[in-house]
Amino acid sequence: MTTLTWIFAATIAGGIISVLGAWMVASRVSAAQVSVLISYAVGALLGAVFIELLPHAFNRSDNLQVTAATILGGLLLFFILEKLVLWRHCHIEDCEAHDPHDPHAQAHNGQNGLHNHATANHHDHGRSGMMILIGDTFHNFVDGVLIAAAFMADTQLGIVTAVAIIAHEVPQEIGDFLILLHSGYSRRYAFALNLLSSAAMVVGGVLAYFALQTMEQWVSTLIPLAAASMLYVAVADLIPGLHRRPELAATVQQVTLIALGIATIWLVGAIAHGH
């Protein structure tokens, strides 16, 4: 097999395996449980940002201040993008985004199969879903670049790198899938969007093969932007919703699931890196 064939096969497998793995786990979760298990998604996102993406971004950085500024700029960028989504989907006088969301209504709507565009408005107007898809697309694109770089250095290194990336992607895709359900998308549509986002891995790998030097320069910017997107979704979009259940039992459950999400990312990372 040629190097390009290895890269193409590895990136295709990486996207399909991670999305299918997430689908097999997350599809067993009922719509009524999505608002509860979103705590796990918060943990997985925070774990991916602080355990994987940010260390990787700073390790690759030639200027830590520029990298930190890129993350800060990314947070502002996604704040603006979220505003644009709200402006597009809201009427000035009559918009659910101006009122607190009812998590019980969200679960009820999901259980009754109202998975059209209007249902997204009953959840969070698809904002979290759109933000996480943007971040996941960046992340998948960068993963493709990294896989290509490894294969161009050594085939065995490329195989190990691809396996490690797939192992990291599965728990992250579970969180992404739950967030899309939380945003009001149907299971089938959420699966299709995740699969489409994973295609960025193939694009990144193939482009990197033909223009590796140029792509390597982009990686230093794409990784902090991906981290900013995931951090924004977790902190700005998802965590505030958890505060609507302030009772002690719910809080303990949320903290436990957040910790479980973080631990999942750490454990998978440790296994993938052979520690």
Image: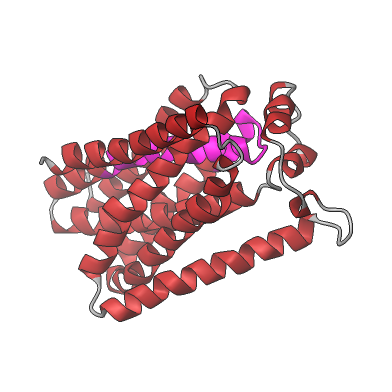
Vertical placement of 62 versus 251: above or below?
below
Q: Residue at x 29, y 47 (%)?
A: 5
Left/right placement of residue 2 relative to residue 234 reads left
In percent of width and height, residue 204 lies at: 39, 58
Segment tinted magenta in the rendering: 165-193
How many numbered discs sit on the rendered protein? 0
In percent of width and height, residue 178 lies at: 53, 35
Quadrant of the frame with the C terminus? top left
Q: Residue at x 70, y 65 (%)?
A: 84
Judging depth in this view, the residue of 112 and 21 nearest the camera is: 112
**Magenta stretch encompasses residue 148:** no
Judging depth in this view, the residue of 97 and 209 nearest the camera is: 97
Q: Residue at x 39, y 77 (%)?
A: 69
In the rendered image, is residue 19 in sight? no
In percent of width and height, residue 169 lies at: 35, 41
Helix, strand or loop: magenta stretch: helix
Judging depth in this view, the residue of 27 and 243 nearest the camera is: 243
In percent of width and height, residue 196 lies at: 53, 45
Vertical placement of 134 versus 188: above or below?
below
Vertical placement of 92 versus 217: above or below?
above
In the rendered image, is residue 263 in sight? yes
| Image-quadrant location for residue 111 | top right
Quadrant of the frame with the N terminus? top left
| Image-quadrant location for residue 173 | top left
